[in-house]
Image (cartoon, rainbow, N blue to C red):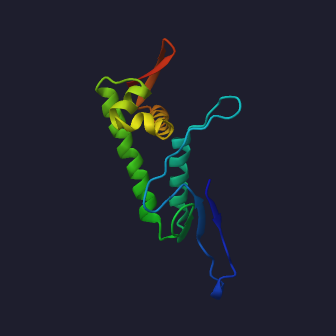
């Protein structure tokens, strides 16, 4: 979660528009919203939360973001908009895959990431499940349980 800070002690009494964003915004690469269930096995919709946080940060009109990795990000408005756009563009790719007839998270992951699927299983499945949650909440897809496996279909 990102935290905004205001500092009225800046020279001239001007308020600082700083944001401590952690891993939400990294300058050179998009962040992966990892899925992590709690002790009861209930997981949050991590990509949905990430998108909401990016939108909230964009509305704050901050001047400087302290990222969890890399350099501080000056005038981050365009980068925030770019990350939001990238999420929507990638979501559209997943819709296309589902429309092609691949309906399981595992099938989507194997098609999209091929040999990386097993080597980076957690990262890849976090991404796939995050996007499937996001598309479901957006009303773009539905899911049905068949023999213990979720299958996704376009609405």
Q: Against 75, is 48 above or below?
A: above
Q: Is residue 28 left or right of residue 19?
A: left
- Which residue appears farthest toward the left when viewing the image? 100
Q: Residue at the spot x=51%, y=69% of the render?
A: 71
Q: Which residue is more in the foreground, 55 or 131? A: 131
Left or right: residue 136 compared with residue 66: left
Query: Between residues 60 and 97, which one lies in front from this camera angle?
Result: 97
Q: Is residue 120 above or below residue 50?
A: above
Relative to 58, say whether 131 is above or below: above
* Residue 105 point in image, percent of width and height: 43, 28
What is the number of callouts on the image? 0
Residue 146 seen in this snapshot: yes
Percent coordinates x, y for residue 153 in the rendering: 38, 23
Kindly give the residue lying farthest to the top in the view shown: 147
Quarter of the figure that contains the C terminus? top left
Estimate the x, y position of residue 26 in percent, counting from the top left: 49, 59
- Percent position (x, y) of residue 64? 54, 71
Q: Residue at x 36, y 37 (%)?
A: 113
40 or 116: nearer the eye?
116
Residue at x-position 51% and y-position 65%: 70
Quadrant in the picture for residue 57: bottom right
Asked where in the image residue 21 lies, by quadrant, the reply is: bottom right
Specify whether residue 155 is in view.
no
Residue at the extreme bottom: 12
Left or right: 72 as drawn, with respect to 89: right
């Amino acid at each position: 979660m990102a935290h905004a800070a205001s500092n009225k002690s800046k020279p001239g009494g001007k308020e600082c528009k700083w944001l401590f964003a952690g891993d939400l915004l990294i300058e050179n690469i998009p962040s992966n919203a990892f899925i992590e269930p709690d002790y009861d096995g209930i997981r949050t919709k991590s990509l949905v939360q990430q998108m909401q946080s990016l939108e909230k940060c964009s509305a704050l009109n901050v001047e400087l973001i302290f990222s969890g990795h890399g350099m501080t990000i000056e005038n981050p408005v365009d980068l925030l908009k770019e990350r939001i756009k990238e999420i929507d563009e990638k979501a559209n790719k997943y819709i296309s895959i589902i429309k092609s007839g691949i309906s399981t998270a595992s099938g989507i992951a194997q098609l999209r990431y091929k040999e990386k699927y097993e080597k980076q299983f957690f990262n890849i499945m976090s991404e796939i499940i995050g996007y499937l949650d996001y598309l479901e909440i957006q009303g773009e897809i539905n899911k049905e349980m068949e023999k213990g496996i979720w299958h996704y279909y376009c609405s």
